[in-house]
Image (spheres, rainbow, N blue to C red):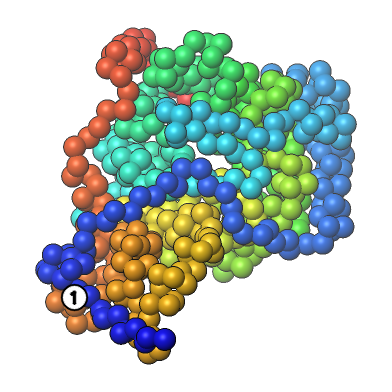
Amino acid sequence: MTTKTPAQPRSRKRRGRGDGTPPASKRTVNYRQLRNPFPVMSVFSDDEAANMHETALRMLEDLGMRVLLPEAVKLYAAAGARVDGDMVYIGREIVEAAIASAPKSIHCHAGTAERDIVLELGALAFQPGAGAPHATDLRRGRRPGSAQDFTDLARMSHHFDVFQMMSPSVEPQDVPTHLRHYFTLLTQAERTDKFPFLFSRGTPQALDNFEMLRIARGLSEEEFKAGAHAYTVINTNSPRTLDVPMAQGLIDFARHGQLCIVTPFTLMGAMAPITVAGAITLSHAECLAAITLTQLAGPGAPVCYGTFTSNVDMKSGAPAFGTPTQFQASLAAGQMARMLGLPWRSAAGSASNVNDAQAANENQMGLWGCLLSGATVVIHSAGWLEGGLTVSYEKIVTDVEVLNMVAELCAGNKAGTDEIGFANALSQVAPQGHFFAAPQTMERYNTEFYEPIVHDYANFGTWTERGSRDANTRATEVWESILAKPEQTMIPPDRLEQLRAFIDKRTAEGGAPPES
């Protein structure tokens, strides 16, 4: 048998332009409809989880929920709940009927069909950090969130395929609150075809949002109500309170067939018991109460179970994120959601003040809690600093690197004849040889591996020659290159004209102040 000559490595210049610049990639990716590849973990036994669920039902029956919206109280009462002023005592049969009517799979209609996502147990969707009053980047520093920031972050969110859903990134504080919902929806309609977020700050704003989205999508009222075309996030006021705008949001979105993501925000040791079991039991009870309201307002309305449970720093009282306790809380919430069969949301995030090692550690710890608990939607998956007070441009980029890697894992791998490569790789290289020039390598070198957007794999010498740029500096260059591209308009001109005319008309009429 003839011994083959070992393959020789190709010159580095064949892979680039000789100036250290990587070659143009031929690799294509599609991160648009992901499935979670990881087996779910549990923190409690099945019996313990069942006892937590039973305790949550007992809380709703015996302790009740404080509901501040009279219309919501009437809906609960009509279903058979006992009412005493603004205290509502919800029987388990009412809750069980609501869970039975809530859809277990939700088709979310984006601006284009290829951006549609399906939310159900086993699916996986990411959205960037949301709802922050501040923005920060290395060029301009920390500042109040502005209209420009909201537009920039919308463009960045659209650019990265791994975000399947848009988010209310920062509050554009230079836009008045009675007009802010016009600006945020118009920006999303113009800059992206991904599944959008709508504010739920009272019926007037909700109805404005629905009408604007119908115009942007070219839908009749019946077509709009027949499918989920947008989502909102509803927070309970822990412990055991539903305030006016949140209860109204649940009702408005349910009656118009749009998605509510219910999210009690429970910090252990502050507005929730200090233990994981106690905090998740409280969160679970509040979720059940809110989900029940959606089904009383609109049977079959799309709704996601959710939680955002972490602990406080008991020395300062400040929220802490990415902790082992938050990880365990995510696992416990996943057990509760699977018990109900509903799609659900969890969250990552960081309490760090800057995009540093702490920020990366906390975000990844929180992210892995979401992944291993089987979360359907991961909110605040990138960019969140200071426990949600700031969204960082650089952190969005550095966190996206990790999300992209997770998305790569979602695709799995193959081990067929071509992948094993006996004929075109293993048999082509002699002992102590190398595979740089093997036929299999030559066929796949430009498409096989994940290509980082901000990580630098150069050795120290090359990295030094290129200016010794750290990850934050490289991330700045990434987001600047995204925003330097010409802006695209994602909505047909005739619809954009109609949308602007509607906004001008409503603005002239005084807009819609948020309800409190």
Of the 4 image quadrants, the one containing the N terminus is bottom left
Q: Residue at x 27, y 28 (%)?
A: 489
Going 27% across and 56% down the picture, which residue do you hit? 25
Residue picked out by circle 1: 11
Which residue in the rendered view is the most extreme toward the front?
1
| Picture quadrant of residue 138 | bottom left
Q: Is residue 193 left or right of residue 119?
A: left
Residue 188: percent from the left, percent from the top?
A: 37, 31
Residue type for callout 1: Ser
Specify the quadrant of the image occupied by residue 463.
Answer: bottom left
The residue depicted at 51 percent of the width and 54 percent of the height is 411
Mark 1 neighbour class, 10 Å CA radius: few under 14, some 14 to 19, many 20 or more: few
User: Considering depth in this image, is 424 or 433 the residue closer to the camera?
Assistant: 424
Image location of residue 351, percent across then percent down: 47, 61
- Residue 284: x and y in percent read 73, 46
Task: Tell me which corner region of the image, top left, top right, bottom left or bottom right, holds residue 84.
Answer: top right
Where disc 1 sits, the SS reads loop
Q: 382 above or below 211?
A: below
Q: Please name whichever residue, 246 or 326, is drawn nearer the observer in this view of the structure.
A: 326
Q: Write the residue at 37% across / 67% down.
A: 440
